[in-house]
Image (cartoon, grey):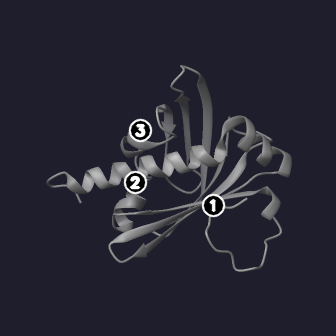
Amino acid sequence: MTDDAATNGAESATADREIVITRVIDAPRDLVFEAFTEVRHLAQWWGPHGFTTTTRSFEFREGGVWAFVMHGPDGTKYPEWITWTEIVAPERIAMLHGEHDGDPDAFESVLSFEQRGESTAVRMLTVFPSRELRDAAIERHGAIEGGRQTLAELAAYVERRLRTPGVR
């Protein structure tokens, strides 16, 4: 399932397990990428509208872990765990994302950052272990809308930073 407007006609072997969400952010790529590198940034924007995060541990490096709790607007707590599997600054971040280390339902996400003039195109490709898990994430957890809202929160955060004197 894709949010991309155009496809190249060739489907990947994982197409039935994927969600792809894109957004163009009115900020330079290095600033957008930087928003992922420190917990002080992530705490300001990570998650859909109305969600907040409490970090238990954070180390942004390949093999590093971010363990945190997402707090929904209704007070529900969602334990989360991410390990960074690849970091190519400022082009790409790959991660394994689940509820805990060893989660058999963990999914892979790859974020790509493409400079487009003064803006940055962010592409978030998520691949689930099975089509059923992808479908459940969409139906029960609103994964597509949640992903769109998360990228909107990222955009708002970096665009605010650009308007703040002395921040670049």
Residue type, label 1: Asp
Residue denoted by label 2: 155
Nearer mark to the viewer, of 1 and 2: 1
Earlier-in-chain disc, 2 versus 3: 3
Q: Position of residue 65 (x, y in %)?
A: 57, 44
Asked which secondary structure carries label 2, the reply is helix
Residue denoted by label 3: 43
Earlier-in-chain disc, 1 versus 3: 1
Task: Tell me the residue at 34%/61% (across/down).
Answer: 31
Asked which secondary structure carries label 3, the reply is helix
Task: Tell me the residue at 61%/69% (across/down).
Answer: 5
- Other-residue count near label 3 (Cα within 10 Å), few / some / many at <14 / 14–19 / ≥20: some
For the residues labelled 1 and 3, say whether their Cβ atoms are less than 8 Å apart: no
- Other-residue count near label 2 (Cα within 10 Å), few / some / many at <14 / 14–19 / ≥20: many
The Cα–Cα distance between marks 1 and 2, rounded to whole angstroms, is 17 Å
Earlier-in-chain disc, 1 versus 2: 1
Residue type, label 3: Ala
Q: Position of residue 145 (x, y in %)?
A: 59, 46
Q: Is residue 133 above or below residue 162?
A: above
Residue 89 visible here: no
- In depth, the one of 75 and 112 nearer the eye is 75
- Residue 135 tag number: none
Residue denoted by label 1: 3
Residue 136 falls in image quadrant: top right
Residue type, label 2: Ala
Nearer mark to the viewer, of 1 and 3: 1
For the residues labelled 2 and 3, say whether their Cβ atoms are less than 8 Å apart: no
Residue farthest along the top direction in this orientation: 75
Q: Position of residue 133 (x, y in %)?
A: 80, 44
